[in-house]
Image: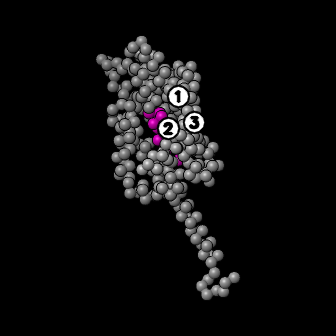
């Protein structure tokens, strides 16, 4: 137990400098993003087709500051991913050193795909459903702070969830994830995706939760496909190596060379 604790402390000490760099980068990007926060807010408000409201004098500032933090978090993710790759993966699998740049590029593209899916499909559908309950007697006034929280949480959650196939690829490469895991646990996956959707979705309505469940389940089956392909390649390479070793071995009874 003491050895494990010492190892963890040593790993944290090694990563301390990188964590500090990421923290400074996050703060600098947050300040920079605040200067453009109004423009970013206009992009989000296009989904509503109406103006936001502020229920207190400071809510406008808090809303823009929150939006700046969300944007800074997203922009810091590539640097954080590179840090994790250097500090956690490469010391254990040095052969993957040349994969660093492509992995960060693919991870960034996957995150962008998830965020774009949320912006163009899920957010308009979810917001339209919630706003659709207004009538002649009830007018929906949307708080700027809550709208940014709703949009930021959903977009970032979708972006991060789209990293699942990439994670599944490397776990399969390491032999830690097998296709049988997905075949035998699809019922558990349905339950877990439902719970995750309920936690991630900022609103308690079933409609938005169902919208979030669908891409999560889709990612589960895409990850299964990725693991299946990687597993087939690993088994094929193993068979080829076995055949090569058998060919090099002399037949029984043959005189030694």
Residue 159: give its label: 2
Residue nearest the observer in this picture, 213 or 166:
166
Which residue is outermost to the right? 257
Between 12 and 112, which is closer to the camera in this rendering?
A: 12
Give, as a single range, the part of the protein colored magenta: 154-166
Against 52, residue 210 (above or below) is below
SS at badge 2: helix
| Circles 3 and 2 in contact, beta carbons < 8 Å | no
| Label 3 to label 1: alpha-carbon separation | 23 Å
Helix, strand or loop at label 1? It is helix
Q: Residue at x 38, y 39 (%)?
A: 197
Q: Nearer the viewer, residue 250 or 119?
A: 250
**Residue 155 magenta:** yes
Along the polypeptide, which appears first: circle 1 or circle 2? 1
Q: Residues within 10 Å of mark 3 (few under 14, many from 20)?
A: few
Give percent across and percent down for residue 87: 56, 44
For the residues labelled 3 and 2, the Cα–Cα distance comes to: 27 Å
Q: Going by the image, does 117 lie left or right of 128?
A: right
| Coordinates of residue 180 in the picture (x, y in percent) | 43, 59
Mark number displayed over residue 17: 3
In terms of depth relative to the viewer, which is nearer, 126 or 82? 82
Q: Which residue is mark 1?
A: 71
Residue at image position (47%, 33%) is 155
Q: For residue 121: magenta?
A: no
Q: Residues within 10 Å of mark 1 (few under 14, many from 20)?
A: many
């Amino acid at each position: 137990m003491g050895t494990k604790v010492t190892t963890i402390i040593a790993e944290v000490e090694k990563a301390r400098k990188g964590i500090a760099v990421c923290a400074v980068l996050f703060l600098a990007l947050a300040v920079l993003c605040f200067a453009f926060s109004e423009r970013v807010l206009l992009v989000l408000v296009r989904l509503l087709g109406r103006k936001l409201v502020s229920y207190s004098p400071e809510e406008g500032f808090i809303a823009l500051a929150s939006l700046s933090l969300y944007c800074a978090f997203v922009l810091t993710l590539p640097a954080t991913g590179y840090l994790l790759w250097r500090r956690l993966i490469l010391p254990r699998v040095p052969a993957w050193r040349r994969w660093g740049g492509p992995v960060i590029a693919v991870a960034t593209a996957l995150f962008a795909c998830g965020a774009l899916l949320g912006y163009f499909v899920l957010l308009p559908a979810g917001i339209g459903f919630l706003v659709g309950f207004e009538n002649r007697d009830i007018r929906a006034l949307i708080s700027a702070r809550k709208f940014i929280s709703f949009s930021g949480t959903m977009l970032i959650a979708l972006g991060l969830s789209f990293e699942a196939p990439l994670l599944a690829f490397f776990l399969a490469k390491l032999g830690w994830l097998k296709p049988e895991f997905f075949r035998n646990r699809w019922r558990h996956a349905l339950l877990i995706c439902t719970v995750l959707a309920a936690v991630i979705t900022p609103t308690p309505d079933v409609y938005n939760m169902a919208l979030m469940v669908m891409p999560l389940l889709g990612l589960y089956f895409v990850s299964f496909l990725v693991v299946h392909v990687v597993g087939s390649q690993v088994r094929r390479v193993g068979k080829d190596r076995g055949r090569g070793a058998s060919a090099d071995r002399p037949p029984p009874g043959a005189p030694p060379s």
